[in-house]
Each structure stands twice: as C-alpha cells, then as structure tokens.
Image (tube, grey):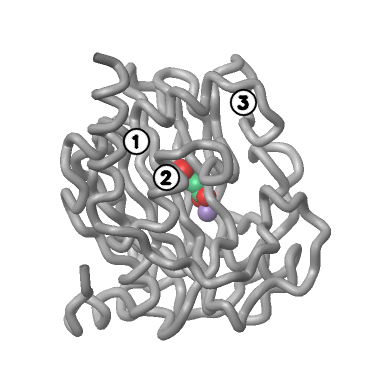
C-alpha cells in the first residue's frame, strides 16, 4: 500500500490522516481475539485500570503472534517509511483497550514530548500508525486530536505521574485552549479495520469510556533508524532498544494466521 502525494500533503498539513477500512473485518476479528488473549495474561507489560480491566498491553508484538505480524505489516510499515523517508524501527507498541464502562482518560499530550524528554529521541522523525480493533465511535472514548498542533514543536508540559497509566508529559489547559483556537478539535471515528496515522508532535488525548462498548486500538510508534533514542532510563518494553529496520512481511500475513488458527480449532 502506498500513500498518494495528496495524502502525504494532508498528513503534513493537518498532522494526521484517517484511512477507513484498510484491514478486512476478518483481519480485525483476528486482532480482537489476539487482544483478548494478551489482556488475559498476567504479565508486567499488561497494565490495568483501577477496576482490574486491561488498559494497555505494551510490546505485545514480542509475545503474541498476531501482533508480531501486525508489527511488520506492509500496510502499516510502508506508509510510515514513505512519510519518514527511510527505514524505520519500532520505538513502542501498545494495544490500548479503553474498556466498556471502565476505560479511563488519557490526558492531553504530544508523544514526542515524552520520547524526547525521557528517551532522548533527537528529532520528531517518528510517528504513530494505529489500527482500530473495535468500531470507534463518538460514544466509546475516541482519540481527540487538535489538528495542526504539530506545527509548534515541543510545547511546554508538566510531568504527570498520577492520572495516566505511566508517567507522561501533559499540557496545561491554557495551552490546549490556545492550540484548539487555531486548529479546532476532532475525533476521527470509523469501523474496525480503519487506520489512523498521526505525527509524534500532534497534541492528542482521549476521554473516559462510559459506554457499554469497548474501544481497542493498536498503536505502532515507528521511528527513523537514524533517529533512535539515546537514553535508556525507561523499561525496554516501553521504549524499545532494537533499532534494526523492520522488514515488512507479506500483505496476507494476518489472513494466513487466521486460516491457521481456524484449521487448528477444527
Ligand atoms: C495514547 O495517546 O498513546 C493513547 C490514547 C488512547 O489510546 O486513547
Ligand atoms: Mn499518545
């Protein structure tokens, strides 16, 4: 899959790009099963809300076959290589649940703010590409973006050690208001299998999910190989240290696994 010149232009202009239904319902179903598998594991990488439901499974591509394949999927890796203009490595991999009724807030932040301050990633030559594992709607805690907010570099932030699942550099309300007066605030929504690309400088957040519907999204945070992190104070499974370029797998790698699983179940 290749992004058009127009799509790349839109990404740079707005700071994000939404591509509906890039993965088939069957591929999304496999990812849903794999999410449930990782959330049922008792591992240090799986973080939970106060109620015990899963919030985030970090580095799931290192202990789950479906996510291993997703982490090297050409529909994810190739568009990012186009935007970042070169080979990329996996800086972070998250399966974020935002569970029905209990999924809690993610405060306003820029990912590069944390990657730069905590991991000494030199430049914002890194970004997120995400896949909706569930339908994402206005009701179930969608991501909120401030379009064009990536154009202001790293903005001032405070180290939030309390309200987020792990220490995050978050923006104060006055800054969020100022940026939103310029760019507005949007919540890209769509069916499972849709894809969302966003700049590591884009200001984003997500509200709690009080709806009865879960909202799982997988995030690959990919970084240009020359721009790898210089500091290693966070755990390896939060800020990865393998800077090898990702070699994309075949386009049918998820379908192949779904068929294999189906055959094994029969
Ligand atoms: C994030 O900002 O890294 C995650 C937000 C979300 O999944 O709602
Ligand atoms: Mn983020």
Is residue 143 placed above or below 73 in the rendered structure? above
Residue pointed to by mark 3: 48
Residue pointed to by mark 2: 218
User: Image check: 218 left or right of 112?
Assistant: left
- At 59% from the left and 67% from the top, the residue drawn is 112
Residue pointed to by mark 1: 31
- For residue 201, say whether it is visible: no
Q: Around disc 3, counting alpha carbons within 10 Å, would you say few (fewer than 14), some (14 to 19), or many (20 or more)?
A: some
Q: Earlier in the sequence, mark 3 or mark 1?
A: 1
Rendered image: mark on residue 191 = none
- At 33% from the left and 17% from the top, the residue drawn is 212
Asked where in the image residue 62 lies, by quadrant, the reply is top right
Marks 1 and 2, how far apart at CA:
9 Å
Marks 3 and 1, how far apart at CA:
19 Å
Given residues 132 and 75, the one toward you in this image is 75
- Camera-near label (1 vs 2) is 1
Contact? badges 1 and 2 (CB < 8 Å): yes
Confirm if mark 2 falls within 8 A of ligand 1.
no
Is residue 71 placed above or below 116 in the rendered structure? above
User: Image check: 245 left or right of 172?
Assistant: left
Q: Earlier in the sequence, mark 1 or mark 2?
A: 1
Given residues 103 and 93, the one toward you in this image is 93
Label 3's element?
Answer: strand
- For residue 252, say whether it is visible: yes
- x, y percent for residue 108: 54, 52
- At 38% from the left and 71% from the top, the residue drawn is 80
């Amino acid at each position: 899959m290749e992004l058009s010149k127009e799509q790349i232009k839109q990404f740079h202009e707005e700071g994000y790009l939404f591509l509906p239904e890039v993965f088939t319902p069957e591929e999304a179903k496999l990812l849903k099963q794999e999410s449930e598998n990782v959330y049922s594991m008792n591992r240090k990488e799986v973080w939970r809300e106060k109620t015990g439901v899963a919030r985030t499974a970090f580095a799931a591509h290192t202990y789950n076959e479906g996510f291993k394949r997703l982490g090297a999927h050409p529909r994810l890796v190739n568009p990012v290589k186009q935007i970042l203009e070169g080979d990329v490595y996996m800086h972070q991999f998250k399966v974020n649940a935002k569970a029905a009724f209990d999924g809690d807030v993610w405060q306003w932040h820029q990912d590069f703010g944390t990657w730069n301050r905590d991991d000494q990633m030199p430049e914002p030559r890194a970004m997120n590409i995400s896949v909706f594992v569930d339908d994402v709607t206005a009701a179930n805690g969608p991501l909120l973006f401030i379009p064009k907010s990536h154009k202001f570099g790293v903005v001032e932030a405070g180290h939030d050690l309390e309200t987020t699942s792990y220490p995050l550099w978050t923006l104060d309300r006055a800054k969020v208001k100022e940026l939103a007066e310029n760019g507005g605030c949007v919540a890209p929504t769509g069916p499972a299998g849709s894809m969302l690309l966003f700049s590591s400088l884009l200001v984003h957040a997500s509200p709690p999910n009080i709806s009865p519907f879960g909202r799982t999204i997988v995030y690959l945070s990919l970084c240009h190989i020359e721009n790898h992190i210089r500091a290693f104070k966070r755990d390896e499974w939060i800020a990865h240290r393998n800077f090898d370029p990702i070699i994309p797998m075949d386009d049918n790698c998820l379908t192949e696994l779904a068929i294999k699983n189906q055959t094994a179940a029969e």
